[in-house]
Amino acid sequence: MDQISRRHLLRSGLGAGALAFLAGCGGAGTSRRPGIRVTPRASDASDWEFVPQKPDWLENGTVSAPPSVMKGVVPRSSWTRATPKLWDTNPMGRVSRITVHHDGMTPFMSTSSSSAAQRLESIRNAHVSGNGWADIGYHYVVDPAGRVWEARSTTLQGAHVKDNNEGNIGVMVMGNYEQQVPTVAASTSLDDFVASLMRRYQVGVSRVFTHREIRPTACPGVNLQRVMESTRSRGGALARA
């Protein structure tokens, strides 16, 4: 990172956390053109219901189809008023895979919705101001309390696995899982939510990845990697989805 970008992040109030992020979930890349508390019942993945909604930033004809926002997901409008740079994005197209990440910043254990919202905004700022991306790279984010947050619209390709964003939904779990272990609430919610995405988009468990399984990176951290290996193995929650 050059000194100008570093100074810009510091002046923007992101501080060491955002700088740590830029070195955290490595290899994300982007595709370019040449205070709400929502706690779903984690025991039943059918609680995640898709509800078609059209965000106020979506201009007619800019994106081919309206996004599907899931009931039980904390809406994007609750944590940011920023809008994506639609001219610098590509449409998602047919979803064919799902990739799980961590944010790779400092460990994060807070169950506060306001703290989670602030962390989300710092990540979005780092992605846009620091990396020069169109928006936050992930489509959904799970916090330690098990809430699922809407991030980038699923009508748009994300910026979470370099050169592998087409048809790929990015789900990030807040925290650094090289240094901490996922909470029970986060792990259970991640299982149920990813299972609901698998059913929605007809994605088999063999097409559910972690970042390191596609690109060389430490993401999603050794402890979340173990959780994902277990849940996808025979008898695991995602293997049975």
Image (cartoon, rainbow, N blue to C red):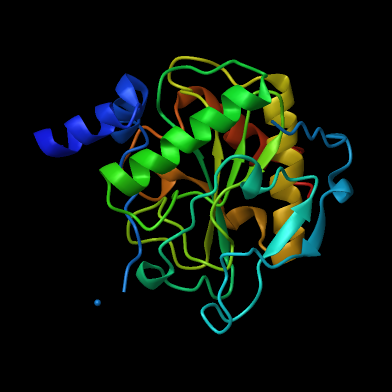
Image x and y of residue 9, in percent: 27, 33
When the figure is inspected, residue 241 is found, relative to residue 24, above or below; the finding is below
Q: Residue at x 63, y 25 (%)?
A: 114
Residue 32 as seen in the image, left or right of residue 97? left
Q: Residue furthest left?
A: 3
Image x and y of residue 235, in percent: 77, 38
Q: Nearer the viewer, residue 48 or 53?
A: 53
Say whether residue 31 is visible: yes
When the figure is inspected, residue 233 is found, relative to residue 202, above or below; the finding is above
Image x and y of residue 53, in percent: 74, 65
Q: Residue furthest bottom?
A: 61
Say whether residue 102 is visible: no
When the figure is inspected, residue 212 is found, relative to residue 52, above or below; the finding is above
Residue 208 as seen in the image, left or right of residue 83? right
Residue 70 as seen in the image, left or right of residue 86? right
The N terminus is located in which quarter?
Answer: top left
Q: Residue at x 10, y 33 (%)?
A: 3
Image x and y of residue 120, in percent: 51, 35
Q: Residue at x 75, y 31 (%)?
A: 188
Where is residue 74, by image quadrant?
Answer: top right
Q: Nearer the viewer, residue 205 or 113?
A: 113
Q: Nearer the viewer, residue 234 or 123?
A: 123
All told, the count of numbered labels is 0
Residue 4 as seen in the image, left or right of residue 193? left
Where is residue 24, by image quadrant?
Answer: top left
